[in-house]
Image (cartoon, coloured by chain):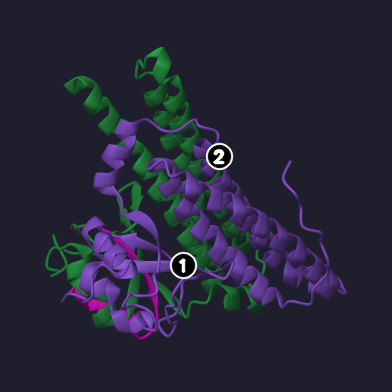
Amino acid sequence: MSKRSQKKFEEIVKRFVELKDTSELMIDLAYSALLLNSRELAEEVQRLEEYMDKLHTEFELQVLSSGFKKEEAKSFLGLIRLGVVTEKIADAAAQIAEVVLRGVEPHMVLKLAIEEADETITYVQVTEKSSLVNKPLKDTKIPEETGMWVLAIKRGEKCIRPKPDTKIQVGDVLIASGYAEGEEDLKKLAAP
Amino acid sequence: MPSFEKIEYKPIPVRELLREMKNLSELMIDLAYSAALFNDRELAEDVLELERRMDTLAYQLEMVTMVAVRDAEDAEALVGVSKVAAAADKISDAAADIAAIVTQNIGVHPIVSEIFERVEERLIKVKVQENSILVGKEIGALELVPRMGVDIIAIYREKDWIINPKGKEKICAGDILIARGASEGLKELKELCEGKRDELEG
């Protein structure tokens, strides 16, 4: 395989991973929105849905313009289908978020089914002085020290699904959930 | 033609049905991506089997909520439940679509799998043999996450799935474990399950 086509594939896979991660992040956020009856989170899910549309179009164009050979058509069809699936998952997440936006009081049953004990959701922007800057998430010990769990990281237009080795940058907005008393601790850590 | 299970009303709590639908949909997505990206037909078939279970659950949940609604107030309180159940069902459909890429021999380009393996965690499916040291141990006590960076996300036992098993859950001989994590750790777990390794590291 030539260097050029290897690079092309890397780009396609990168875009697909972003689609996959965004769709899964949307599911997590949608359930949290429901649990906490948070319009703010539900709106975030709706915004991500629009972002997904844009991303999905770019992904499809990239696959279609990759100049594949006839005998490769099938495995490229597989890729296109994977993209469609991420879109379907994102739709399902938006559907869950819509319940919140329509003002349906979350039924006790929903809270019990989601099985998480979160009480609150908090948004905090990471400042230059924070000890979190440039650290991978797994080294920050945020859950141990604050009892809060980082659901998502907003970085400019993007919303990132945190992975253990995601590095925190200045200006990132951490969206975290947990018990109310952890909120202050997280603020001290991110914006001292 | 797939065969469909006959539907009968069962008085199962909505909470339990919905929780199972939610957990099942998330497990199915993980299994399905792994099946497609690593071209694993067996995993893909598991996903399709789970999809049939999901459909049955969706029918049951719908019947249980129908029975529970007596007036407009009940309807307003429960519409959220039925919408969320429908979303979980949609997610499981999406998972089945992914699995179909494998079962219909479409596949994804092998280079994609190769690149993907570098960026994403893998899933494995492994059977616990009788001589494995894991037999009879509680999952929590094994400390698999800090020790080897792997997480048991489901157990298939006696034709039933235990999704997100709790720390107190004991591993039995014959269990099929689905685990996620770093490839080194997964290799180790596989050897432990197959009785080829007798001690936990770390």
Q: Nearer the viewer, residue A175 or A56?
A: A56
Q: Which chain is green?
A: A
Residue A168 figure quarter: bottom left
Residue B97 in view (yes/no):
yes
Q: Colour of chain B?
A: purple
Q: Amino acid at mark 2?
A: Ala
Find numbered disc 2 in the image and state the secondary structure of the residue it sits on: helix
Residue tagged 1: B154
The disc at residue B194 is none
- Label 1 marks a residue whose chain is B
Q: Residues within 10 Å of mark 1 (few under 14, many from 20)?
A: many
Q: Is residue A177 above or below residue B28?
A: below
Quadrant position of the N terminus of chain A in the picture:
top left
Q: Quadrant of residue A180?
A: bottom left
Q: Nearer the viewer, residue B201 or B109?
A: B201
Q: What residue range appears in magenta?
A: A170-192
Tell me if A174 is positioned left or right of B105 in this view: left
* Extreme-front residue of the structure: B131
